[in-house]
Image (cartoon, grey):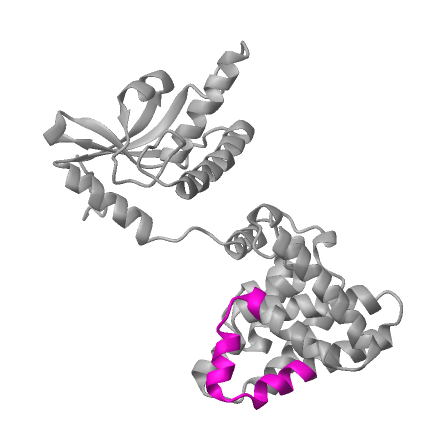
Amino acid sequence: MKKNFKMRNDVRCGYIDFDYAVKVLNFDESNRCHGIDDGNFCESVMKTANARIRNSYNMLKKEGWDDCCPLVVHEVESEGNKWYVTDGQGRFEALIRLNRELVANGKEPAITEIPVTVYHCQTIDDVRNAMIKANTRQKNWTAIDVLHHNAIKFGGMSLNVYNRISTMMDELGITSKYIPSLIIMGSHKAARKDLVADYPEDLIMPTCDEFFNAFKKFYNNVCNRDKRLNNKFKSNEMAIALESVMRSIASVYRNDNIETYNFILNKCMDIIANYLDKLDDRSLVRIIGAKNAVIRREFIELLSKRKDKKIQAVVEVMRKNNSMSNAA
């Protein structure tokens, strides 16, 4: 019988003691920033690195170092089999901080063994090529990937929401899973991986049906250009700006008068769609190709020109929300 599995003699998997790891593991200078002690990175990059480390710190403190996500190390023969961390250096730095903090407070270290995959290679250039491949040819799971996993694993609300997202994508004619998530959960939750574990009912926005219909109407009214521009209309940045308009309308009218709310919602979407539809291609690209904050300001300026008092009330909320967003 033909063997379908071949062993590799250049890869080893196992566990390494934490104290020993601190002594033998090295960080190559070409790797990305892994902590505040890095001397050749700007302040902004170090700030981003430490934000990653804080996330890893909280994960390790809560869950430990799961053996399904080992530290990846390359053993370099030309340097006396010296070990270099090529993936997981942020997690390792977080563990160092966590264990030091616990010991300083008279407690035992949280984790004393680390799962490791060791690749044997010849030179430091082999290490650097491996780092580039590991960090440019793969993409982490999105919130929707996590939701799909949980939809299959748990069913229930996760499955209902995932099916709803799929239906919305088909009906809106979009490839972005972010836009249905934005409609269902709102701008502050659409990309949050930590909120998709079970999807309780209170994560679903009460406005999702009305917002979905408004998006559908908007796309039907404006997507009459060439394919490139039509795709711009359906970008995430445009969707975030539109959702901010819809959310402002809902905050003013939805709880008081549902008929007025639906009327103003449809009217504002018609105003925006008609305005964009009448622009020449160059002017249109300037707006719909911008970041959502720029598009929001354009919508505020457009709606502020209407004399309708009901729309002016919406504009006031939009300006307030925009100011708060800029301050944050």
Where residue 248 sits: x, y (%)? 74, 66
Q: Nearer the viewer, residue 208 or 30?
A: 30
Identify the image quadrant of residue 45. top left
How many numbered marks appear?
0
236 magenta-colored: no
Q: Name the residue located 40 percent from the left edge and 37 percent from the top edge.
A: 69
The vertical placement of 124 against 197, above or below, is above
Residue 131 is left or right of residue 152, and the answer is left
* Quarter of the rendering containing residue 90: top left
44 vs 114, nearest the viewer: 44
Q: Nearer the viewer, residue 160 or 323?
A: 323
Residue positioned most to the right: 256
Point 54% across, 57% down: residue: 144
The one nearer the camera, 259 or 293, is: 293
Name above or below for residue 25 compared with residue 322: above
Q: Position of residue 225 (x, y in %)?
A: 49, 88
Main secondary structure found in the magenta portion: helix
The range drawn in magenta is 271-294
Write down the quadrant of residue 38 in the picture.
top left
Indicate the position of residue 88 as horizontal and vertical percent values. Answer: 37, 36
- Give x and y (percent) for residue 84: 25, 31
Q: At x 64% / y 48%, what residue is drawn? A: 198
Residue 286 belongs to magenta span: yes
- Residue 167 at least partly seen: no
In the rendered image, is residue 258 in sight? yes
Left or right: where 150 falls relative to 126: right
